[in-house]
Structure formats: structure tokens, C-alpha cells
Image (cartoon, rainbow, N blue to C red):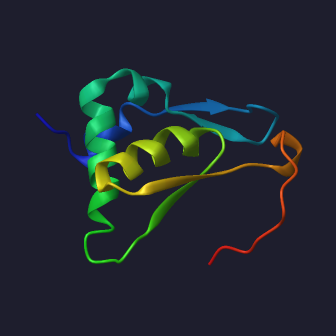
Amino acid sequence: MSLSETDLKRFIQNVSDFPREGINFKDISPLLGDATAFATAVSLMAHSFEVEEVEYVAGIEARGFILGSALANLLNLGFIPIRKPVNCRAKLSPKTII
């Protein structure tokens, strides 16, 4: 069974004023905790790339790692994690990715 985009919105909770006042955080934990909802969300994202030539999926930390790696797996592509330099342990050379 799959869900519609409207159904998936039920799995995303709005947390007002988090992490600070004026910010409305989108909590996707309920989406990640439901196998059908998570699979449907990743499948819907994959449809966006059906007509594109894509070599890699890149995900911005931290939620992007979860969604991006699942998307890359579904599309049989490599995954590139994008991190803040302060969170990288290894010395990196800056590169521009287009």
C-alpha cells in the first residue's frame, strides 16, 4: 500500500519556535518510523529523476543523509554527504559541485 502526498503530510509534525523563537521545525521522525510512509516518500522523490541523467545523490546533514541515502539506494546511485566543514574530521580540499 502506498500513500498520497497529502497522506504523507500527516507524518510531518510542526514544532513552533524550535530550535529558537520564530523558527517552525518540521519533525520527520513519525515519517521515518512508518515503513510505508518512508518508502512512499522516497519513491515519490525518485519519480522526479526518471527523465534526468543523475550520477549521484547529495544530502545535506543531517536529515538529508537519511533521505538522500535511501533515495540513492532506490536509484542505484552513489551518495555524497554534504557536511559543514566544522563537522568533518578529515582535512578536505574544497571543491565546487555543480
59 displayed left or right of 88? left
Location of residue 26 with respect to 56 vertically, above or below: above
Residue at figure coordinates x 36%, y 32% from the top left: 10
Residue at figure coordinates x 82%, y 43% from the top left: 88
59 displayed left or right of 11? right
Residue at figure coordinates x 39%, y 57% from the top left: 77
Is residue 32 or residue 66 the one in the foreground?
66
Is residue 96 or residue 92 the one in the foreground?
92
Q: How many marks?
A: 0
Residue 24, located in which quarter of the rendered image? top right
Dividing the image into 4 quarters, which one contains the N terminus?
top left
Residue with the most extreme left position: 1
Is residue 38 or residue 66 the one in the foreground?
66
Indicate the position of residue 76 as horizontal and vertical percent values: 32, 54
Residue 19, located in which quarter of the rendered image? top right
Indicate the position of residue 48 as horizontal and vertical percent values: 32, 66
Is residue 80 or residue 66 the one in the foreground?
80
Indicate the position of residue 57 as horizontal and vertical percent values: 48, 59
Dividing the image into 4 quarters, which one contains the C terminus?
bottom right
Residue at figure coordinates x 80%, y 49% from the top left: 84
Indicate the position of residue 81 as horizontal and vertical percent values: 62, 50
Location of residue 96 with respect to 9 vertically, above or below: below
